[in-house]
Image (cartoon, rainbow, N blue to C red):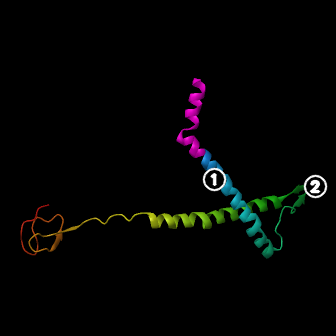
Amino acid sequence: MEIFDGFKKFILRGNVVDLAVGVVIGSAFATLVNALVKDLLTPFIGAIAKTPDFSKLFFTINGSRFMYGELLNAIISFLLIATTVYFFVILPIEKLFSRIKRKDPVAVTTKKCKECLSDIPVEAKRCAFCGQPVKK
């Protein structure tokens, strides 16, 4: 069954499995963020603006109804989701990575003279303090 062997190799490749995990986690995360926005942030805005749902807003020109309320809902939802992701995901992860990230090693610019133990530049051929020749 060569067909199934090739399919098995394709499915078990790292890229396919990583992509599947990413899609599942992304979907679960989207559900979480949407719930946070819908159940907590939107009612909070509704308490301030006294209108949590703008979908019924419209205006009419020459008998045509322009339902701009849905657009307002979508814009507010997008801004809330983007803000939530930034403050609750991006900023904490950046802080975590900045703490984890190793500091770049400081470039060595001096060395010790073997005779007088003074600090001299790395490129020096003689010690400025005792005059002894110094190896590079």
In this rendering, would 108 be left or right of 53? left
Q: At 68% across and 55% down in the image, what residue appears? A: 28
Q: At 50% across and 66% down in the image, what residue appears? A: 96
Q: At 76% across and 64% down in the image, what residue appears? A: 38
Mark 1 vs 2, N-terminal side: 1
Report how many numbered discs are placed on residues in the image.
2
The mark found on residue 63 in the picture is 2
Check disc 1 and give the amino acid type.
Ile
Membership of 17 in magenta stretch: yes
Stretch of the chain drawn in magenta: 1-19
The mark found on residue 25 in the picture is 1
**Quadrant housing residue 65:** bottom right
Say which quadrant the N terminus sits in.
top right
Membership of 56 in magenta stretch: no
Main secondary structure type of the part rendered in magenta: helix
- List x then y, in percent, for residue 118: 14, 74
Q: CA distance from mark 1 to mark 2?
A: 46 Å
Q: At 28% across and 64% down in the image, what residue appears? A: 107
Q: Is residue 31 above or below residue 113?
A: above
In this rendering, would 119 be left or right of 102? left
Say which quadrant the C terminus sits in.
bottom left
- List x then y, in percent, for residue 133: 7, 66
Q: Secondary structure at mark 2?
A: loop
The mark found on residue 95 in the picture is none
- List x then y, in percent, for residue 33: 69, 61
